[in-house]
Amino acid sequence: MDSPYIVEMEHITKTFPGVKALDDVRFRLKAGEVMALLGENGAGKSTLVKILSGVYTRDSGSITLFGNDIHSDLKPKQAQQLGVSIIHQELNMCSHLTVAQNIFLGHEACKARLLDNRLMRKQAAEVLQSLHIDIDPDTVVGDLAVSKQQMVEIAKALHANAKVLIMDEPTSALTSVEINQLFALIRELKAKGCGIIYISHRLDELQHIVDTVTIMRDGRFILEKPFADMTLNQIISNMVGREIKEKFPRIHTSKGRKILSVQNLCAGRMVRNINLDVYEGEILGIAGLMGAGRTETTRAIFGIDPKQSGTITLDGKELTIHCPQDAIREGLVLAPEDRKKDGLCIKLSIRENIALPNLDKLCNAFGIVNRKKEDAMVAQVVRDLKIKLSGPEADASSLSGGNQQKVVVGKWLARNSKVVIFDEPTRGIDVAAKVEIYQLMNELKKQGIAVLFVSSEMPEILGFSDRIVVMCDGKITGSLLQEQATQEKILELATRFENKFALER
């Protein structure tokens, strides 16, 4: 009897130096099925799909694709030719090329040894139209929004005859409207018989598209089960190996004195007349839709983007901030949205990342680093934040997302900072690591440190903030105490757009 599965991986094992990433793992996928591949950071999900897509080779185990046993190691080109495509969380596109050129990249259409641009544009338009994607094939990809770039990646995969599509955190940078568009596209692909492997830490979105769940933990297969037969709490407990009793472990402390005051801050088009105060031991959430100006506001406060007007007062002292170094010196620090790009030097060691912004405290008058002080600082950060690492000399890139976030914060805490700003602190990390980040923010709160945090996840804003300010169109449109806040109230404030066009009389 023929197998109903288009992908069958059995007894897959993969070892890296010092780490067994996969240990006797099983994975199966049917045509027209959306399979959620779930697990904590470090569970082995990425390693497994990289073996399936030919990026990594397996140490042992068997792979069967579309009924054919794959005896030799897969190469990326071979996997793509067999019908396996992967859309990475960090989109892998040539931003200076057009949509049509990206779709045909690697298998360009030629005529008399010259590129047949007319044919490529025509066929690109056809594949986009078949997916109901309204994008001009001649548009330069770098000019498109992230959501549109993602749809071009999907079109590219289908043009390459993808029968298995792997999506890694596809909604992490999308608005709710764009997520709905992506889900509609996934349903269409499913109806055409495409098998989809869906990797996401946003468990609440699974109900809209997922048929089956495969859960991994510590490099091992845990279970495969229909999504409808499991509760969210069951999924989480299988992922982490224990029950997480409280998703948002918020603590109550007495609000201290006003520590940070931002008055009439203007910076560029997206930061307009911002007024906010933050108190010692308070967690202030900043809510709003994508493009509301939340990240731009944190950048202006921290000195990355120049302010045009307004004042920033810290602990009663008006600050002159021309660059981030000025803010850091005063005790005002930022854990940025893209921790890999802006928060860490991922090719440097954990030790070097913690020491780098603290060299003024670690060096003597001749600029020589005091190694004893450095060792003590690194050891204290690792101990206090419970960072899981093989050793301080390991590259920051070797850490899970949650532990990378701890290093970003830890380097600032070594300076006894007064205000810590988090921009999307839990993006791309698993549910257990999220709780660890919340506990870290609680520790800051207990120490009397003021915390600002930007989040696009409504439950997180509602569940963890002491107070919430809402932004829309570059302005603060309202402020709510935690006990007053509801999703409806936040959305109402988040959609108070200005009427920028005068009505015709």
Image (cartoon, grey):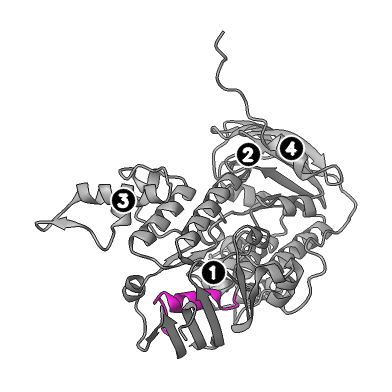
Mark 2 or mark 3, which has the lower sequence index?
3
Above or below 2: residue 182: above
Helix, strand or loop status at disc 2:
loop
Q: Which image quadrant is residue 72 in? A: bottom left
Q: CA distance from mark 2 to mark 3?
A: 52 Å
Circle 3 residue: 124
Helix, strand or loop status at disc 3:
helix
Mark 2 or mark 4, which has the lower sequence index?
4
Helix, strand or loop status at disc 1:
loop
The picture places residue 175, in percent across and down from the top left corner, at 58, 47
Circle 2 residue: 320
The crowding category of the residue bearing disc 1, from other C-alpha atoms within 10 Å (few below 14, some 14 to 19, many at least 20), is few
Between label 2 and label 1, give the one nearer the viewer. Answer: 2
The crowding category of the residue bearing disc 4, from other C-alpha atoms within 10 Å (few below 14, some 14 to 19, many at least 20), is some
Query: Please, which residue is most extreme toward the left here?
Result: 112
The picture places residue 504, in percent across and down from the top left corner, at 55, 11
Mark 4 or mark 3, which has the lower sequence index?
3
Circle 1 residue: 368
Between label 2 and label 3, give the one nearer the viewer. Answer: 3
55 part of magenta stretch: yes
- Kindly identify the residue that appears in the image at 72 percent across and 35 percent down: 493
- Numbered range of the magenta stretch: 42-57
Circle 4 residue: 276
Q: Amino acid at mark 4?
A: Leu
Q: CA distance from mark 4 to mark 3?
A: 48 Å
- Kindly identify the residue that appears in the image at 66 percent across and 60 percent down: 207
Q: CA distance from mark 3 to mark 1?
A: 58 Å
